[in-house]
């Protein structure tokens, strides 16, 4: 299992497959979460199931090995000398567990429930990050870049020729398609024209402005209210 994990991770890093990398990271995180939760619960509860303990032992021994060899950074401490160490004595306190109200512990239900992000959104975030590198100095905000890229993507998703090519070819072959490039150029132009026209209508039609204020205002209120 260690060999398969390391090989898949190296291949994903080489191909810059962030979706696969996140899935592998989630797998390693779930193993550690299982071990931590079992260690805690097994102190107060007898599971009477040796398979659960066997899994815990196996996951505990496996998880430290689920990493690439080149992830381990060697730090040379040969010239480092510990000259002194400071210690501080704090007040002694006693914890009386017989006092106070008894509160039942909530069952552990969150461990191992992490969800992998939507691959499409993950790739869109990657696109925004890479575009920001190219747009350095332009002053664009992340949400502006994401909205622009998302609009282009929506235009291209409706292209029937691209749909047929995606079904009939591998990802590498699809990325080499001249149809893909032509569709991108057209989508950028259509998105630009549509945004300009919508902005023009907004500035001349009070009804459009009122509609935006009403709907977007209510959406924004809820999001800001929940974020507070």
Image (spheres, rainbow, N blue to C red):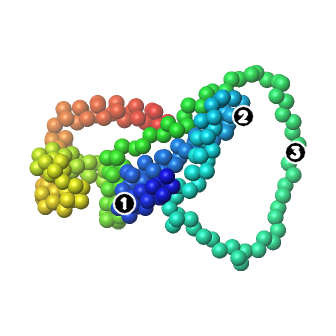
- The dot on residue 195 is none
Depth order, front residue of 32/145:
32
- Disc nearer the start of the sequence (3/1): 1
Compared to 74, does 194 lie above or below? above
Decide if residue 142 is in sight here: no
Decide if residue 8 is in sight here: yes
In the orientation shown, which residue stands out farthest toward the bottom?
Answer: 79
Q: Residue at x 12, y 57 (%)?
A: 179
Horizontal side of residue 173 vs 46, given as left or right: left
> Where residue 33 sits: x, y (%)?
57, 42
Q: Nearer the viewer, mark 3 or mark 1?
A: 1
Q: Residue at x 78, y 70 (%)?
A: 82
- Disc nearer the start of the sequence (2/1): 1
In the orientation shown, which residue stands out farthest toward the top?
Answer: 101
Q: Quadrant of residue 174?
A: bottom left
- Disc nearer the start of the sequence (3/2): 2
In the orientation shown, which residue stands out farthest toward the front?
Answer: 50
Cα–Cα span, label 3 and label 2: 29 Å
Q: Residue at x 69, y 29 (%)?
A: 46
Residue to which mark 2 is pinned: 43
- The dot on residue 91 is 3
> Where residue 111 sits: x, y (%)?
55, 37
Q: Nearer the viewer, mark 2 or mark 1?
A: 2
């Amino acid at each position: 299992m260690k060999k398969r994990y390391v090989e898949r991770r190296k291949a994903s890093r080489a191909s810059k497959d962030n979706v696969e990398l996140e899935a592998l990271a989630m797998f390693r995180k779930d193993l550690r979460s299982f071990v931590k939760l079992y260690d805690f619960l097994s102190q107060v509860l007898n599971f009477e199931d040796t398979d659960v303990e066997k899994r815990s032992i196996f996951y505990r021994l496996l998880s430290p090995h689920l990493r690439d060899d080149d992830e381990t950074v060697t730090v040379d401490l040969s010239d480092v000398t510990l000259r002194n160490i400071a210690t501080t004595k704090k007040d002694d306190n006693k914890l009386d567990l017989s006092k106070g109200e008894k509160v039942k512990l909530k069952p552990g239900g969150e461990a191992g429930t992490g969800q992998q992000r939507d691959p499409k959104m993950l790739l869109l975030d990657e696109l925004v990050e890479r575009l920001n590198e190219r747009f350095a100095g332009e002053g664009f905000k992340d949400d502006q870049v994401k909205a622009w890229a998302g609009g282009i993507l929506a235009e291209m998703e409706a292209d029937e020729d691209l749909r047929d090519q995606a079904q009939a070819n591998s990802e590498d072959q699809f990325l080499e398609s001249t149809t893909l490039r032509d569709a991108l150029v057209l989508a950028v132009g259509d998105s630009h024209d549509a945004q300009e026209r919508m902005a023009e209508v907004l500035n001349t039609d009070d009804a459009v402005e009122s509609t935006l204020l009403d709907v977007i205002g209510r959406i924004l209120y809820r999001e800001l209210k929940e974020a507070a």
